[in-house]
């Protein structure tokens, strides 16, 4: 268990104040924050590259705060990968290995899908390939925790899917990870726990479900943006695909490309609320009960139980005209084209 | 082809004049030296011994001081500390003071009257009039070139690479030798070449610390004052040729590192 206790530091006009959280062995911890919120600084504080002004870093109760960087065994992968440009991929991956363990290089490369790259120079790699090599190099030391700085941010869609599935596989193999990002999709797709960072301060920590469905502050709710996200299994139907959640609710997706397991997300703005069963072309039509009505800057947000909780954003005027209140039976509809699928990327 | 504007022609003229300014005196000197005089100089043992001494003293001075100057350049590139600006100014001092002044200053430290000189004497050795004294004088005036180039080279190595190496379990010493040094190599090599070349040509500081044994610039000066221009020219042309060959060869060697880095 990695415990971060009251970590604080000031750098120029910018401050990290009293950051505390703990990451249990085997957790996939996502630190979600805007750019400039201090995410990279927190990783550098944990690894010891920056000395904190206050606070402690503990591993299973042992204080690492005063330990030199090279003895902490916390692996850090920067967003720009920081591969050594003067070394081949093989030498990069082998950097942390003692000479006697040189044989592990091929094994590590295979683990991240970089076996074909071993004799290349970093300058010739694509961003996705460089990310794989950087991961293999860091994993070579069997780090207690793998710290990732925006690992998917600079990648194109295809590389992103590949790396995402690789990260999920590492997590399944028992690797503890801390992943910082500004992108809620990554938290939805990967995290077992999420912390939201606002101006150098953690404002909420919880499971993705808690963070996205029960944001504790306006900042969290606005920052995480999307309230409707559901995990499930894709089922192909003639002419379309559907995601079936654990509760058995079936959401229709546009197109047939999706397969396997994954998440769907859609904006609460895309959800229309009706007092009777709607006609029209929307593929997703559900009957449900209003559980909660919450005023937000753009209007009101309704939490509607249709087997899963679907959030809809409507104006105050609509709310009054329809005479909606908690406990009311309503219909919700949204187009399948409004639904975005984030595949887990695992081979079925 | 695009027509040349008067501006382009003006620029070409400027370039031509600068080149002429550098090449004309050298070419004039070479062309004024007869093959017979050159043959005579090449056969002259004193000239060859002096050139060899000059090359060896400069190599030795460069190599010895590189061992301490290169790690120090890393510190200057990476660490921020109080008084750093002043320190950088002090390091560049040998470049801006007259070299005879540098020689006098060194003499004060190395002569038999000084503490260093007395210690050396007790060990049966004197810096004055000794190749070691020559190497020290050469290094004193040329060290800023190496430190400046190495500092710039280290400064251009992304800090993240060094940080990453530390998180991979490498000690700071290993990071220096496996990451910082190889990546700054091009600048360091170029600094070594500059320091060596500058040492090779040093006259003012060396003549005060060691008139004898004579390095090539002093030999040329001595021949000029004793025998006149014609005699000095032979030695000057031979030294020019040797310096050019060595300098170009080293530049090429240093330049070859480029392809590996890119």
Image: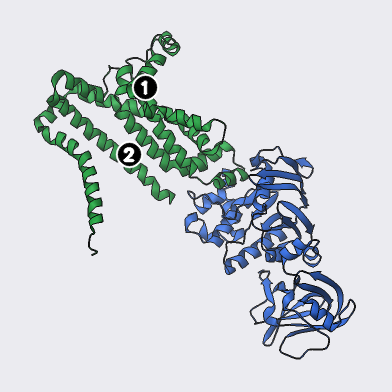
Chain colours: A blue, B green
Location of the C terminus of chain A (image quadrant): bottom right
Look at the picture and state if B29 lies above or below B133.
Answer: below
Is residue B200 toward the left or the right of residue A173 in the image? left
Up-down: is B19 above or below A260? above
Residue under disc 1 on the same chain as residue under disc 2: yes
The secondary structure type at the circle numbered 2 is: helix
Say left or right for B48 vs A211.
left
Which mark is in front, 1 or 2?
Answer: 1
- To which residue does mark 2 refer? B250
**Quarter-of-image position of residue B209:** top left
- Numbered tag placed on residue B102 in the rendering: 1
Question: What chain does badge 2 belong to?
Answer: B
Q: Do the numbered discs 1 and 2 sit on residues whose CB atoms are within 8 Å?
A: no
Instruction: Name the disc covering residue B185, or none.
Output: none
- Mark closest to the chain's N terminus, 1 or 2: 1
Lateral position of residue B215 relative to residue A176, left or right: left
Nearer-the-camera pick, B105 or A344:
B105
**Can residue B61 be seen?**
no
Between B123 and B184, which is closer to the camera in this rendering? B184
Q: Position of residue A313 (x, y in %)?
A: 77, 75
Question: Which residue is found at the position 71% from the left and 83% from the top?
Answer: A335
Going 67% across and 53% down the picture, which residue do you hit? A39
Say few, some or many: other residues with alpha carbon within 10 Å of mark 1 (under 14 / 14 to 19 / 20 or more): many
Q: Position of residue B61 (x, y in %)?
A: 38, 26
Of B230 and A316, nearer the camera is A316
Local crowd at mark 2 within 10 Å, few (<14), some, or many (≥20)? some
Q: Residue at x 67, y 56 (%)?
A: A180
Q: CA distance from mark 1 to mark 2?
A: 27 Å
Tell me the SS state at disc 1. helix
Q: Is residue A199 among what the camera can see?
A: yes
Residue A93, position in %: x, y?
Answer: 56, 51
């Amino acid at each position: 268990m990695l415990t971060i206790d009251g970590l604080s530091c000031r750098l120029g006009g910018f401050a990290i104040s009293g950051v505390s959280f703990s990451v249990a062995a085997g957790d996939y911890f996502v630190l979600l924050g805007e750019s400039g919120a201090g995410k990279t600084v927190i990783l550098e504080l944990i690894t010891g590259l920056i000395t904190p002004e206050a606070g402690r870093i503990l591993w299973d109760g042992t204080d690492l705060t005063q330990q030199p960087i090279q003895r902490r065994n916390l692996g850090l992968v920067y967003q720009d990968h920081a591969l050594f440009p003067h070394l081949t991929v093989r030498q990069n991956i082998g950097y942390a290995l003692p000479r006697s363990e040189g044989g592990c290089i091929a094994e590590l490369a295979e683990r991240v899908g970089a076996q074909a790259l071993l004799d290349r120079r970093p300058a010739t790699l694509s961003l996705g390939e460089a990310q794989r090599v950087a991961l293999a190099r860091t994993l070579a030391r069997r780090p207690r925790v793998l710290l990732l700085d925006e690992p998917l941010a600079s990648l194109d869609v295809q590389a992103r899917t590949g790396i995402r599935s690789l990260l999920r596989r590492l997590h399944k193999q028992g690797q503890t990870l801390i992943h910082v990002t500004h992108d809620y999709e990554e938290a939805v797709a990967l995290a077992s726990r999420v912390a939201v960072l606002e101006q150098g301060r953690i404002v909420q920590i919880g499971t993705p479900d808690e963070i996205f469905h029960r944001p504790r502050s306006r900042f969290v709710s606005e920052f995480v943006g999307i309230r409707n996200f559901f995990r499930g299994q894709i089922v192909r139907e003639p002419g379309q695909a559907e995601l079936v959640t654990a509760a058995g609710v079936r959401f229709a997706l546009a197109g047939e490309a999706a397969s396997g397991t994954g998440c769907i997300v859609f904006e609460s703005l895309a959800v229309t609320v009706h007092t009777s069963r709607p006609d029209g072309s929307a593929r997703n039509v559900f009957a449900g009960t209003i559980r909660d009505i919450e005023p937000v800057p753009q209007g009101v947000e309704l939490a509607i139980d249709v087997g899963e909780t679907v959030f809809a954003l409507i104006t105050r005027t609509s709310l009054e005209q329809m005479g909606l209140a908690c406990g009311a039976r309503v219909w919700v509809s949204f187009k399948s084209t409004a639904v975005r699928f984030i595949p887990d990327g695992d081979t079925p | 082809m695009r027509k040349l504007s008067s501006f382009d022609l003006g620029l070409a003229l400027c370039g031509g004049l600068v080149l002429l300014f550098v090449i004309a005196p050298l070419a004039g000197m070479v062309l004024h030296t007869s093959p017979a005089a050159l043959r005579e100089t090449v056969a002259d043992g004193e000239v060859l011994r002096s050139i060899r001494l000059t090359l060896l003293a400069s190599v030795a001075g460069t190599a010895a001081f590189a061992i301490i100057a290169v790690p120090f350049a890393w510190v200057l590139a990476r660490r921020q500390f109080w008084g750093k600006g002043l320190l950088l100014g002090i390091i560049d001092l040998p470049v801006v003071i007259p070299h005879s002044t540098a020689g006098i200053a060194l003499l004060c430290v190395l002569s038999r009257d000084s503490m260093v000189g007395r210690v050396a004497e007790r060990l049966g050795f004197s810096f004055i009039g000794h190749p070691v004294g020559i190497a020290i004088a050469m290094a004193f005036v040329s060290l800023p070139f190496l430190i400046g180039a190495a500092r710039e080279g280290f400064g251009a190595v992304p800090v993240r690479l060094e940080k990453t190496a530390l998180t991979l379990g490498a000690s700071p010493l290993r990071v220096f030798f496996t990451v910082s040094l190889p990546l700054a190599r091009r600048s360091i090599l170029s600094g070594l070449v500059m320091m060596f070349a500058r040492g090779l040509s040093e006259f003012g500081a060396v003549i005060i610390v060691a008139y004898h044994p004579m390095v090539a610039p002093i030999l040329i000066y001595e021949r000029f004052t004793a025998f006149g221009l014609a005699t000095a020219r032979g030695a000057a042309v031979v030294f020019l040729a040797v310096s050019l060959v060595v300098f170009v060869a080293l530049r090429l060697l240093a330049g070859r590192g480029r392809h590996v880095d890119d």
